[in-house]
Amino acid sequence: MTVREFLHISEFITDYDNLIRIAKEIKPSQFVCGVSMPDTINDITMGKLMELQSISNDADFLILPCKILLGVSEETILNEDVQAVLSFSFWVSKEVERVNKLFSKASVTPTPEEQQAGIENLKFGMFGLLDYYATRMHIPDHGDVEKIPWIRVYKCLDMDTRRMKFERRLRNIITKKKK
């Protein structure tokens, strides 16, 4: 069955949870749409990562990973075997989840004082991350940050997080010694 055929009948599927469970178990093939599958998504840009993170419906789930990562046309994807595309899309979904976890770990837990002051109001999502990196690296155009590998942005965020945690510990040690 092709992706096109699957999309036509997908609205009539009643046991969607079972279908997803089965699809997740399919081992991705080495080639999808005639293109070799990457080992990881570590080499993609922030812009491509943001596109993958924005997937919100079934058609995008099947089409966008192949377009973004493999560079193939929608027509090629629609004519591809649905099992190959489904397994690739679930693999990409796991990779994006892995990257999201890395970014979420690279944060500093707010102090009670910061919480009281309303630090929760300073969460700006992906735009905030782009702005952080642009500001840190003196890049005037946020669009230029979208062209940078996500792993570089993550490494800077991780280094800054480690530095901030160290500075907090150091301040606490100095404060305790002064008492």
Image (tube, helix red, strand yellow):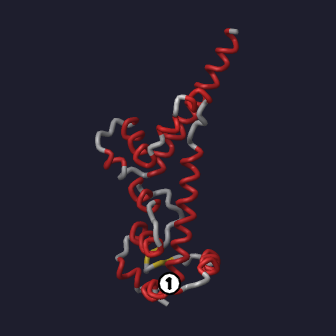
Q: Position of residue 87 (x, y in %)?
A: 55, 76
How many C-alpha atoms fall within 10 Å of the one at disc 1: few (<14), some, or many (≥20)?
some
Judge by depth and name the residue closer to the eye, 36 or 52.
52
Name the residue at the left extreme: 141
Q: Position of residue 108 (x, y in %)?
A: 58, 36
Residue 102 as seen in the image, left or right of residue 74: right
Q: Residue at x 42, y 70 (%)?
A: 64
Q: Residue at x 39, y 50 (%)?
A: 148
Q: Secondary structure at mark 1?
A: helix
Q: Which residue is mark 1?
A: 10
Q: Position of residue 37 (x, y in %)?
A: 49, 71
Q: Residue at x 45, y 51 (%)?
A: 150
140 in relation to 23, above or below:
above
176 in relation to 35, above or below:
above
Residue 142 as seen in the image, left or right of residue 118: left
Q: How many marks?
A: 1
